[in-house]
Amino acid sequence: MKFGQFSIDDARGIVLAHAMKLPEAKFSKGHVLQDDDLYRIKAAGQISVSIVIPAAGMSSRMGKSGAHKLLAQFDGIPLVRRTALVATDSVASSVTVVLGHREQELRNAISGVDVSIVVNADYASGMSGSLASGFMTGQVRKAQGVLIMLADMPGITTADLNRLIAEFRRSGGTAIVRASSQGKPGNPVILPKALQDAVLRLEGDIGARHLIETSSLQVINVEIGPAAHIDLDTPEAIADAGGVILDISPADGRSNRGRQVTTPESN
């Protein structure tokens, strides 16, 4: 019996045949095992973690230019797409991106990436609405843990996400796990299933920090370095991180790659 180009009685063929039955392994028939595939196979079937990426905000600190920080280019890739790709390369069972402000432009930027998209129509109300929109989806509700990955943190890597997920699984899926740098808490953070309903009750521009501070659950910090604190809210921060602002006018849709954006400091 053949499985793609391999015989089922071949050891690699047996691994591939079994991997096909594991939803988190994401292999197709005839896939040739790569270096990190055995880790994915081992992770499949364990405590499930789903990723939610809130990307609905208005980028209000970007100034009068109208530029959207998540469309800034890093190595030629829009930041929102870069974030989504880092997430989908992890061992998480699913990735959900929450859109809102300038939805279509961001939707175009992540076209073809293996993510689910939900829309927070009330994006102007703040972070709580975006979290609730993501947490209400079926695949997230089923997960034993939800990793909240802010969309504007270009230093976060797939390896960072996998370390957080591994630590969450070691806790039995009951602890809060968050990234840190030199002992100072940062992002991303994983919330266990016990806190999902509490997330849905949040109001206003409040994120997960409030839940972490008031919860009686164990909190585990995972040291990942400076990336845990680097988020991009201003044109200056984007430039310092090596990004190029793609200035798009919401009125006419025209773009000017690399255009200098005027800020109060540069006047």
Image (cartoon, rainbow, N blue to C red):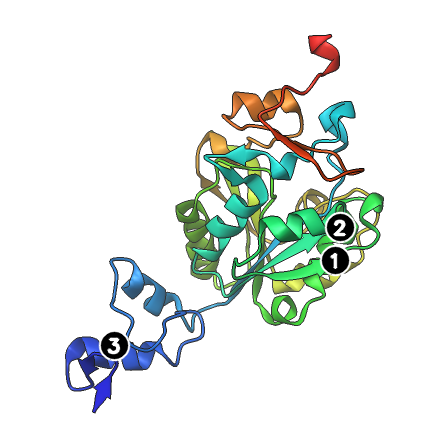
Q: Earlier in the sequence, mark 1 or mark 3?
A: 3
Which residue is under mark 2? Answer: 100
Q: Earlier in the sequence, mark 2 or mark 3?
A: 3
* Left or right: 120 as drawn, with respect to 29: right
Quarter location, residue 17? bottom left
User: Alpha-carbon neighbours of circle 1 within 10 Å: few (<14), some, or many (≥20)?
Assistant: some
Q: Residue type at mark 2?
A: Gly
The quadrant the C terminus occupies is: top right
Q: Secondary structure at mark 3?
A: helix
Q: Earlier in the sequence, mark 1 or mark 2?
A: 2
Q: Secondary structure at mark 2?
A: loop
Rendered location of residue 220, percent (x, y): 51, 47
**Closer-to-camera residue (51/223):** 51
Which numbered circle lies on residue 15? 3
Which residue is under mark 1? Answer: 119
Q: Residue furthest bottom?
A: 1
Q: Residue type at mark 3?
A: Val
User: Alpha-carbon neighbours of circle 3 within 10 Å: few (<14), some, or many (≥20)?
Assistant: some
Q: CA distance from mark 1 to mark 3?
A: 38 Å
Q: Are marks 2 and 3 in contact (CB under 8 Å)?
A: no
Q: Are marks 1 and 2 in contact (CB under 8 Å)?
A: yes
Rendered location of residue 50, percent (x, y): 55, 62
> Which residue sits at x=54%, y=34%?
73
> Which residue sits at x=70%, y=60%?
118
Q: Residue type at mark 1?
A: Val
Circle nearer the viewer, 2 or 3: 2
Count of numbered circles in the view: 3
Picture layout, residue 249 above or below residue 198: above
Q: Quick check: can you spot residue 165?
A: yes
Rendered location of residue 240, percent (x, y): 53, 21
